């Protein structure tokens, strides 16, 4: 049998001295081309295990046991060896992509910086081509190269994080909930891409998730974690057909949707407790709502490519929502769901169209006639019940201080 690529032996982790072990005596191995799924409930220690194995925990953390990559102890690596180990040998895709992305750097700059740090011998042109090809493999087109992370949807940011991990052709990929913020179709494409690369490049994969059904589809082996320990491990087939631990059985039950479906419809109530019927008062109305963003390009790019590069994130949306109604908004990653919500909440100024909002206490009137509503020259009406802080300059200033990307958001919007 081949030498393991990566092995974890009796790993213990406590975040502070004297505190309980969050990871408690965990051992497993991954060979080249292996796909291991690590599943378990929230807080059971999965991410801690991934970070400890890559020596990413703070100095306060108490770590015991052994982690080896190709037979060498990861805990004995020198700082320069450790830098190569993280990225070139093993790549970690984090649960939250914003922890990986700098809001002040474009997507292209992120890729080039990574390549420059690890492969300085590449020419500028080679580096750019490699980066563009890798971004394309996660369905990010070249036209998005010069944009900033805040101009991407949550799912697209996660795809960029995955591209950054793939850039250096690592031998092992540790993917911590890599598709949590993605819709099912994009999530399936990304996982298919990851598993295809594992086979093609003989890359090992540790896929961390709480979703047993997803892990079972893409991994050959499963390790089930519970309260810091691995309580069960085996091939995907054996774990599913013959689960040994009570917790594994409950996970399988949930994955197979055995739980009784509950009726989630609830009757809406006004603050005074009086129920409202679902078809009485429309509370929100969107008319031809548009939110367009302009792609910033230098004059050369504009000269050679005269095609319209506007991103129509929200394009002519009309809908009405009545009191007591619950509207589900679904769609693939990057289709405009979050931009629509932000535009409704007036966190973004719409390019055109109207948002009308009122409560039963301020009965519906035409936006122009309503004293409770103000209408700007852009045709957006705001009711008195919208959060006023969103229109408050002081609030905007504080937001820009805590979130530097806010300033850029203004710059890249097209005029209304
Ligand atoms: N930096 C930290 N300092 C102290 N405790 C922490 C820290 N990070 C995580 N923990 C604790 O360690 C335990 C395990 O957390 P961890 O993030 O590893 O869980 P997880 O299995 O990845 O959960 P999830 O599925 O929600 O991501 C939790 O009790 C958590 O509160
Ligand atoms: Mg986690």
Image (cartoon, rainbow, N blue to C red):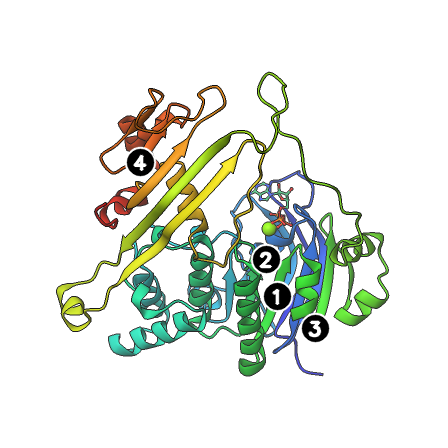
Q: Disc 1 designates what residue?
A: 206
Q: Earlier in the sequence, mark 1 or mark 3?
A: 1
Q: Residues within 10 Å of mark 4 (few under 14, many from 20)?
A: many
Residue 195 position within the rendered picture, expressed as x and y whole percent measured from the top left: 58, 74
Answer whether residue 281 is visible to the viewer in this image: yes
Secondary structure beneath dot 4 equals loop
Picture quadrant where residue 326 is located = top right
Tell me the distance, in whole angstroms, between the alpha carbons under discs 3 and 2. 19 Å
Residue 272 location in percent, x, y?
A: 60, 16
Residue behind mark 4 = 380
The local secondary structure at tag 1 comes to strand
For disc 2, the marked residue is 50
Q: CA distance from mark 1 to mark 3?
A: 11 Å
Q: Residue at x 30, y 67 (%)?
A: 143
In the image, which is nearer the foreground, mark 3 or mark 4? 4
Q: Is residue 306 left or right of residue 7?
A: left
Q: Nearer the viewer, mark 1 or mark 3?
A: 3
Other residues around mark 3 within 10 Å, as few (<14) / some (14–19) / many (≥20): some
Residues at marks 4 and 2, CA–CA distance in whole angstroms: 48 Å
Q: Say whether residue 158 is left or right of residue 115.
A: right
């Amino acid at each position: 049998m081949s030498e393991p690529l990566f092995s974890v032996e009796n790993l213990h982790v406590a975040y502070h001295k004297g505190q309980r072990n969050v990871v408690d005596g965990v051992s497993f191995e991954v060979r080249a081309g292996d796909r291991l799924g690590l599943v378990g409930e929230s807080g059971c220690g999965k991410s801690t295990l991934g970070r400890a194995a890559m020596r990413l925990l703070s100095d306060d953390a108490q770590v015991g046991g052994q982690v080896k990559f190709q037979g060498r102890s990861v805990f004995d690596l020198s700082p320069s060896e450790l830098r190569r180990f993280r990225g070139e040998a093993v790549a970690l895709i984090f649960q939250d992509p914003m922890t990986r992305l700098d809001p002040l750097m474009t997507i292209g700059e992120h890729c080039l910086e990574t390549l420059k740090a690890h492969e300085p011998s590449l020419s500028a042109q080679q580096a750019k081509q490699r980066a563009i090809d890798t971004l394309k493999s996660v369905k990010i087109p070249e036209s998005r190269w010069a944009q900033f992370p805040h101009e991407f949807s949550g799912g697209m940011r996660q795809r960029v994080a995955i591209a950054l991990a793939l850039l250096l052709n690592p031998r092992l990929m540790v993917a911590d909930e890599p598709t949590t913020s993605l819709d099912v179709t994009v999530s399936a494409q990304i996982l298919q891409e990851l598993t295809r690369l594992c086979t093609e490049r003989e890359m090992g994969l540790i896929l961390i998730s709480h979703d047993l059904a997803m892990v079972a589809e893409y991994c050959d082996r499963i390790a089930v974690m519970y309260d810091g320990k691995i309580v069960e491990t085996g091939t995907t087939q054996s774990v599913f057909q013959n689960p040994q631990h009570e917790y594994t059985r409950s996970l399988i039950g949930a994955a197979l949707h055995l739980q009784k479906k509950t009726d989630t419809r609830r009757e809406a109530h006004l603050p005074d407790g009086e129920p409202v019927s679902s078809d009485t008062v429309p509370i929100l109305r969107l008319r031809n709502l548009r939110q367009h963003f302009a792609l910033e390009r230098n004059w050369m790019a504009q000269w050679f490519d005269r095609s319209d590069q506007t991103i129509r994130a929200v394009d002519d949306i009309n809908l009405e929502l009545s009191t007591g109604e619950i509207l589900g908004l679904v769609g693939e990653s990057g289709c405009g769901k979050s931009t629509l919500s932000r535009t409704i909440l007036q966190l973004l100024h719409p390019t055109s169209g109207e948002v009308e909002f009122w409560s039963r206490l301020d009965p519906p009137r035409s936006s122009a006639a309503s004293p409770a509503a103000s209408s700007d020259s852009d045709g957006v009406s705001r009711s008195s019940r919208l959060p006023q802080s969103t229109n408050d300059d002081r609030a905007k200033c504080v937001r820009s201080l805590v979130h530097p990307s806010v300033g850029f958001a203004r710059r890249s919007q097209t005029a209304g």
